[in-house]
Amino acid sequence: MKYIELTIHTTTEASEIVSDIMWNYTDYGVTICDRADVIALQTSKETTFWDYMDDELTENKQTDVLVKCYVAEDVAPEYIPAILADIQNAKELSGGALSFGTLEDTKRTVDGDDWIDVWKKHFRPIHLGKIVVVPEWIEYTPQADEKIVLLDSNMAFGTGEHETTSSCVELMQSYITPDSVCIDVGCGSGILGISAIKLGAKKAYLTDIDPIAVESSLHNAKLNRVDDKTVVAHANLLDDTDIQGDVVMANITGEVLKLLAPSMPKNLKKDGVLILSGIIESRLEMVKNAYEEVGLEVTLEKRKGEWFALVLKHKA
């Protein structure tokens, strides 16, 4: 199905009004792209979700905010003029109390299924040691000792293509045994937990704060017929401290790994290993120090491109 993407250039203070007007005419989504939101999130003292951002973002004084909506192509000739008229009317009603910016608009035609087609076109089987990550629509015959992990097309992070994910999959293969209980914090697509089961682990616990990731992990676990050995939770970490992992994995960002450091060891067995990935070089020492402070030590460091992965254990 084709849509018209309508973009309005406005300001932070008027962006919500523009967004509300757009929602009156579409069920297909409205987005607000405002650098002020990114800066506020990054500088928040309560929660940090970002690993790093370009310093120029805070120095850039540009106030332009983009508000976008998607309107079905067949009704666009009627709806888009109505949206623009309503926005102009809101500006007039404000009597100059709010700055609406330029209200410049642009339009382009997009295909709602484009991302799926592109993903399917470029994603091919990925070999990561004994694990082969295979798109579910491709038939692949495994070679001796290869374990297939099927992934359906989805929007959750973790296909094995990125260095952070592949490093985790490769590292875990040195530690998993038939008795292993594995924990994946920030599971994304579920690739790490599913790979652990395919490698012979007896149980895998997966957690994520993103409901899309939880849904994706559940779906992919069923697709790989390992859902009887996996537990997926919508959470930051495991709430049950009685569950102890032989192999605990977290492929997130350096800043978040630092925040999780005080809590992570509670689910790691005394002789277990913790695999951390998603760390850029400028955050490497910060992460190492955070886990050193909670009684863990680095036993192995792996670099792929600009990304680092660590293997840690409890200090003797």
Image (cartoon, helix red, strand yellow):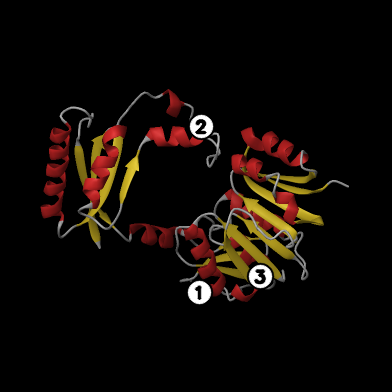
Q: Amino acid type of disc 1? A: Glu
Tag 3 near tag 1, CB within 8 Å: no
Crowd tier of the residue under label 3, counting other residues whose Cα lies within 10 Å: few below 14, some 14–19, many 20 or above: some
Q: Which residue is mark 2?
A: 43
Q: Nearer the viewer, mark 1 or mark 2?
A: 2
Q: Earlier in the sequence, mark 3 or mark 1?
A: 1
Crowd tier of the residue under label 2, counting other residues whose Cα lies within 10 Å: few below 14, some 14–19, many 20 or above: few
Between 257 and 277, the one lying in front of the other is 257
Q: Residue at x 53, y 60 (%)?
A: 189
Q: Which residue is mark 3?
A: 198
Tell me the element at label 1. loop
Q: Amino acid type of disc 3? A: Lys
Between 73 and 243, the one lying in front of the other is 243
Q: Residue furthest right?
A: 316
Q: Amino acid type of disc 2? A: Thr
Tag 1 near tag 2, CB within 8 Å: no
Tell me the element at label 2. loop
Tag 2 near tag 3, CB within 8 Å: no
Figure quadrant of residue 1? bottom left
For the question of whether residue 306 can be seen, the reply is no
Where residue 196 appears, as percent x and y from the top left, is 67, 65
Q: Height in image: 141 above or below 15?
A: below
For the question of whether residue 133 can be seen, the reply is yes
Q: Residue at x 59, y 65 (%)?
A: 232
Q: Which residue is mark 1?
A: 139
Where residue 106 appears, as percent x and y from the top left, is 21, 41
Q: Height in image: 138 above or below 34?
A: below
